[in-house]
Amino acid sequence: MRPLQIALVMLEPPLPFGSAAARIYYSLIQGLIERGHMIKAFATCSRPEEVAQAAELFRKSPCDLRCYPHPSRAGIRSKLNGLGQPFSYMLGDCVRDDIERHLESGCDILHLEQLLAGWLALDHVEHTLISVHYLSQIDLSARRQNLKDRVEYALLRRTEYRLLRAFKYFRSLSERLAKAIVKINPAADVTTVPIGLDLTLYPFLADDRRSKEPTVSLIGSMGWYPSRSGAERLLTRLYPEIRRRVPNARFQIVGWSARAVLKDYLDLPNVDVFEDVPDVKPYFDRASVLLYAPERGSGVKVKVLEAMAYGIPVVTTTEGVEGIPAADGVHAALADDDQGLIDRTVELLLDPEEQNRRRRAARELLEAAFNPTPAAQRLEEIYARIMKGSAEFNHPAKETYV
């Protein structure tokens, strides 16, 4: 395929050691550059220090990266924008204007790396690809809801329906998401493309450097309901029996806002809760097992991928390995019920040799299935269809909301 001019929009700056999303974005850019494409990237950001880090990182890169702070949410105009385009608060006038100018100057593909960024492209649907990483209407359906939660869920669901029906071309991270998109928009062109993970950023932990203390870990942002539900399930339903059977086991929960969200569990024996850490790698290094058991969660769980990449054995649910071709007992230990999760965790904690077999198999799986180059090649197939079909693009029927 000839080199393309691609405008790539992200809701976080691409950083190799940033958040889970930031790492995905970084690998995506590297994969597209290696394929010869010309990337102009637009990233919104809530942390000024990350803007500076990204600017320095991409100063000599072929990718032209521009970062934009989240706009102020005060004032009548902001509130009116929120009513007309819910959850668009990250997309200020500066990023909108710059993207429009870039599209007018000539651009082959507008690639949006989150569904909610779709508000930027309603006038450019024929040239737009949207990556769907998850759907809140799935993730939040199991959340215990007060009135505020119910209103937010209804608004998110309506917003996702509106945006999914407004576009044609989608990249999903799992077959489950692809089926959900087509159910909402039968005219959608949906392709499942795995995450491209730059495994050079994840040094595999040698056997002799692993912690000798049995440590059960959960790592993930507590602002995301699947991770929060997994942490609460671990501490309320799984921890007591695991600790009874392995008395010297320790438990560590690591993530954004972890201590604030899990304040009721900070005094549990042998439990450490760390929040807003600058680097999660030391916490992966001391983990014997990653136990990630969300009540509900769509899409690929990046912290599961990262645990496998670093060489941490994973115990999770079938939803926890969504989009990952992991076999139970080979690449991960899988169970959906509490007793199954407890049994598999205890078995691994008491068997370091099995831990090592499992983690090596998982790393080999990632090397085969999540390489950035094949992921970029699959994206090129979608780009080719977009360019071929843009002239005869038929806008989906007027949206209906459920």
Image (tube, helix red, strand yellow):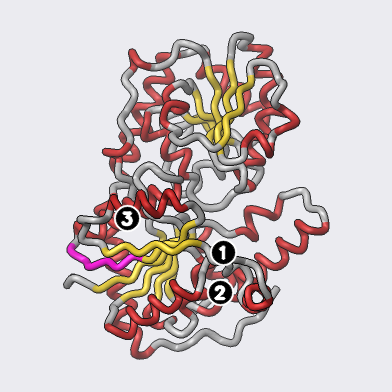
Q: Secondary structure at mark 2?
A: helix
Residue 128 in the image: x percent, y percent?
40, 76
Q: Which residue is mark 3?
A: 55
Q: Which residue is mark 1?
A: 180
Q: Residue sitting at 44 percent across and 68 percent down?
A: 130
The residue segment tinted magenta is: 36-41
Which marked residue is nearer to the observer: mark 2 or mark 1?
2
**Residue 194 visible:** no
Query: Disc count in the image?
Result: 3
Which marked residue is nearer to the observer: mark 1 or mark 3?
3
Answer few, some or many: residues within 10 Å of disc 3's Cα (few below 14, many 20 plus, some between 14 and 19): some
Closest to the observer, 257 or 94: 94
Q: Which residue is mark 2?
A: 163
Relative height, residue 254 to residue 225 (above, below)? above
Residue 224 in the image: x percent, y percent?
60, 48
Is there a contact, CB below 8 Å, between mark 2 and mark 3?
no
Closest to the observer, 64 or 250: 64
Q: Secondary structure at mark 1?
A: helix
**Residue 92 visible:** yes
Residue 298 in the image: x percent, y percent?
56, 52
Q: Amino acid at mark 1?
A: Ala
The image quadrant of residue 340 is: top right
Answer few, some or many: residues within 10 Å of disc 2's Cα (few below 14, many 20 plus, some between 14 and 19): many
On the rendered image, what quadrant is the C terminus found in?
Answer: bottom right
Considering only order in the chain, which callout, 3 or 2, is on the residue closer to the N terminus? 3
Q: Secondary structure at mark 3?
A: helix
Q: For the stretch drawn in magenta, what is the main secondary structure? A: strand
- Say if the magenta span includes residue 39: yes
- Say if the magenta span includes residue 156: no
Relative height, residue 118 to residue 67 (above, below)? below
Q: Amino acid at mark 3?
A: Ala
